[in-house]
Amino acid sequence: MLSLSSPKSSADLVKEYFHTQGLKTQDLPKYISFKDYFSVEINEQKYVVAVNNWKHKTVNLPSIESFYQFLSSQKGKEFAGGLFITHKGYSETVKFFLKANSDKEIVLGLLENKVTTQKKDEININWLYPLDYSIKKKDKPNNNSVQLGVFACKGGVGKTTIIAHLGLLLSELGYSVLLIDEDPERHLKRILDSFLKTSKSLNLKCINADELELEKKNYDFMLYDYPPSLSINSIYSVNNLHYCLVPINLSPLALGLEAEIIHKTFNYINQLNSSVKILALINNEIDSNHPTSKNLKQELKKALKPYPKAHLLPFSIRHSSHLYYWGKSNILNGVGRQSNAYQDFLALADYLIKLLNLEEN
């Protein structure tokens, strides 16, 4: 029990909780770059503890990803596992990420700090372990689906690769997904047909654009794969989009000679659907920390200023060889789940799930 006369941080409350359980805590050396990290000894093994101070926000993937990367580092290997504790909760993609990366034991906890009638704090941690990976969606109207198209006035930027991985991942997370192949060459349909035949449990369907009128089922996500040049029917479907995802390859050419393509894409989308929100996504990024990449991102943000409904997503799809195959090297299978690209697609899925309002922010 704590006195309210000396306010304490969330990390102090967690330490106090451990002490009441008879557990020993220890501050970590300064080489740990995270503020509220310490260790706790449980059954003669040391666990690193991360405490998040957010009281009204759920923890999203980047925070857990940083924790996982630390536990995977040389300095993190001295710990048996990690305990991540916060006040509000965790997004569904956090739990899915931990399930897919089970080589590091990370236990999630919810810190409850209630004031009792005796004007004292009652501290408790609700441990989410064993982790519940079931997807519990909120009830919603059947017509409340997110319609998103992937489009750019240029080929070879990764539109089909992005929508295929995104659709499969969203379906693995428990959402119903309809993929609509608007490209006359049917690249998306050919890629996924053989894959879907062996994964019938997924709640995902891929159809050609001319089959859309026959589709009666309601889906959480309707994702359109557009070719660089739109047909009359494709132009009609753009009118129904809520969001348009525009992949951009970050290179000097993309913001130099190809800057015209970016503006042409944005202007074209706005002409067809003035209410659609444009989500610019950097694809196939090689090194986000390279000075050239940082400078190019700043230039890209300037290029987006004339478009008030265009937004640069706060994450990129990093380069990975696993994006080029649909067999055992796929990012959704085996070692592919350990790739940077897999984690980036989880972040993109997490972003779209929030747009669907199926979980608390």
Image (spheres, helix red, strand yellow):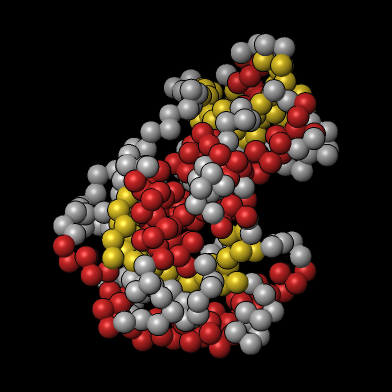
Residue 221 drawn at (x, y percent): 32, 56
- The quarter of the picture where residue 70 lies is top right
Residue 89 drawn at (x, y percent): 47, 38
Vertical comparison of 65 with 228: above or below = above
Residue sitting at 27 percent across and 83 percent down?
232
Vertical comparison of 307 with 156: above or below = below
274 relative position to 318: left or right: left
Residue 111 visible (yes or no): no
Residue sitting at 61 percent across and 27 percent down?
105
Residue 96 drawn at (x, y percent): 48, 39
> Of 214 and 238, which appears nearest the observer?
214
48 relative position to 230: left or right: right
Vertical comparison of 149 with 358: above or below = below
Vertical comparison of 343 with 310: above or below = above
Residue sitting at 22 percent across and 65 percent down?
212
Q: Quadrant of the N terminus?
A: top right
How many discs mark residues in the rendered view? 0
- Extreme residue in the right direction: 30
235 relative position to 245: left or right: left
Residue 33 visible (yes or no): yes
> Of 57 and 74, which appears nearest the observer?
74
307 relative position to 320: left or right: left
Residue 85 drawn at (x, y percent): 57, 32
- The quarter of the picture where residue 215 lies is bottom left
Residue sitting at 65 percent across and 34 percent down?
50
> Of 25 and 295, which appears nearest the observer?
295
